[in-house]
Amino acid sequence: MPKGIVGAGPAGLLLARLLYLEGIDSVVIETQSRAHIEQRVRAGVLEQGTVNLLNDAGVGERMRRQGLVHEGIELRFNGAGHRIDFRELTGRAITVYAQHEVIKDLVHARLADGGPLLFEVEDVAIEGFEGDAPRIRFRHGGEACEIACDYIAGCDGFHGICRPSVPVGALRFYDKTFPFGWLGILAEAKPASDELIYVNHDRGFALLSMRSPGISRLYLQCRPDESLAEWPNDRIWAELQRRFEMGGFRLNEGPIFQKGVTPMRAFVTEPMQYGGLFLAGDAAHIVPPTGAKGLNLAAADVRVLAHALSCRYRTGSHERLRRYSEICLRRVWRVQHFSWWMTSILHRFEYGSEFDHRRQLAELDQVTSSRAAAEMLAENYTGLPFDLPGEEP
Ligand code: APR
Ligand code: PHB
């Protein structure tokens, strides 16, 4: 029987590919169209381990050609920039390559593998996963469909149906909302720096990232319910220029072709499994975007799940599947801590006092002057190794 995979985000598509390579069949269903998922704007930083995983899965060819390898980041505060040298501190680097490009590569591979990958499905429901007859029901092309599968992977993101299908009380949720969001833009403008710049400014956080040598990705801290109507392009550029101000530094400006507000939240489901249902990626957890861990965490989950399923079929042992959640949650909480910490040192908190701001600056001073502190940041940013105890094959 196939594995049923609900959702064709990075988690669902990468899981399907990893299972295919192990000779395990799966069916992937997705509510959106192919065009929609291949254009959806998300973050764009891949940890070294994620890059290796995509390469090993045979979907890294375009990423190797187009991805931008970054060996450090800049932290900017008090009007001065400080570089954190990842290569020197950890021997590792990150790759800047947009999530929707990863999606395109995975969709391409999935279709070349012969699918099935069904888009624009409707009325998805999962049943029977508490016992031994899991089923997925949905409508596709106007027809009612039902797939019997031995396991279901809930890879349908934070707003999906898998997590809410688990009986009330069987899962515990931990969540935190932050009193701010990020206003993000994509602009046709040469990035003003070769590396990402994270800014702690009196007026709030700002971030310079990029998608290619000609496209800048810029963010600024805003209210969580900020209305884009209040942000004409010239106001966005003026605010960004103020927050990045340092000596003669200027952001390059250019036509803005995408704008959006991302709320900031953190969320964890425990456990990440129930009977024959396994939750992975955003369906199980959300991290605030500071540090760009969302996709990387989704990739780490499905690596564990693919391995556990492969053990189950190769050896007949359910042990790895039984421990799926326990294995994943260790990394999930480590990454939650890191994303929360990056968020906490860089943002202006609504109820924060001048005392808190001074304390943040002292922490940034430590991170940029103590090797031990810089190493902690670099190790987490470039990604915890995939061989955390319990995770190794
Ligand atoms: N049935 C099928 N598919 C669904 C359903 C449903 N009922 N509900 C949602 N989906 C689809 C969504 O349209 C989306 O394509 O599930 C997919 C989930 O993908 P993501 O939200 O990208 O989540 P995930 O694969 O876990 O990837 C995590 O994505 O949200 C970002 O920042 C996050 O980078 C992280 C990464
Ligand atoms: C991005 O490029 O979109 C990005 C980069 C770094 C982050 C978050 C988002 O921390």
Image: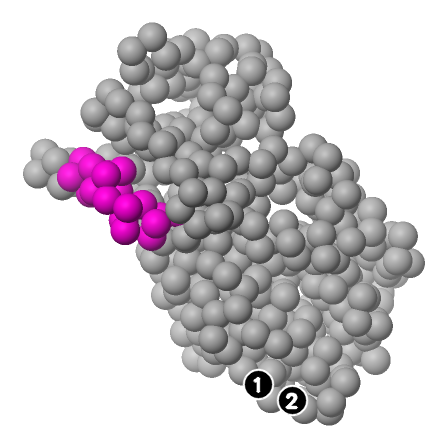
Hey, which residue is sitting farthest left in the picture? Answer: 355
Q: Is mark 1 within 8 Å of ligand 1?
A: no
Residue 371: horizontal and vertical position, in percent? 28, 46
**Amino acid type of the residue tagged 2 in the rendering:** His
Instruction: Kindly state the secondary structure of the residue where label 2 is placed.
Output: loop
Please indicate, yes or no, whether residue 299 appears anywhere in the rendered image: yes
Q: Which image quarter holds the C terminus?
A: bottom right
- Residue identifier under label 1: 322
Q: Would you say residue 81 sits in the magenta stretch?
A: no
Compared to residue 205, the image places residue 108 above or below, namely below
Q: Which residues are magenta?
A: 360-378
**Pointer 2 residue:** 318
- Label for residue 203? none
Horizontal side, residue 172 vs residue 36: left or right: left
Instruction: Please check the rendered image and state whether residue 364 is part of the magenta-colored stretch, yes or no.
Output: yes
Identify the main secondary structure in magenta.
Answer: helix
- Secondary structure beneath dot 1 equals helix
The answer to whether 47 is drawn above or below residue 388 in the figure is above
Q: Is the residue under label 2 in contact with that under label 1 (CB below 8 Å)?
A: yes
Q: Residues within 10 Å of mark 1 (few under 14, many from 20)?
A: some
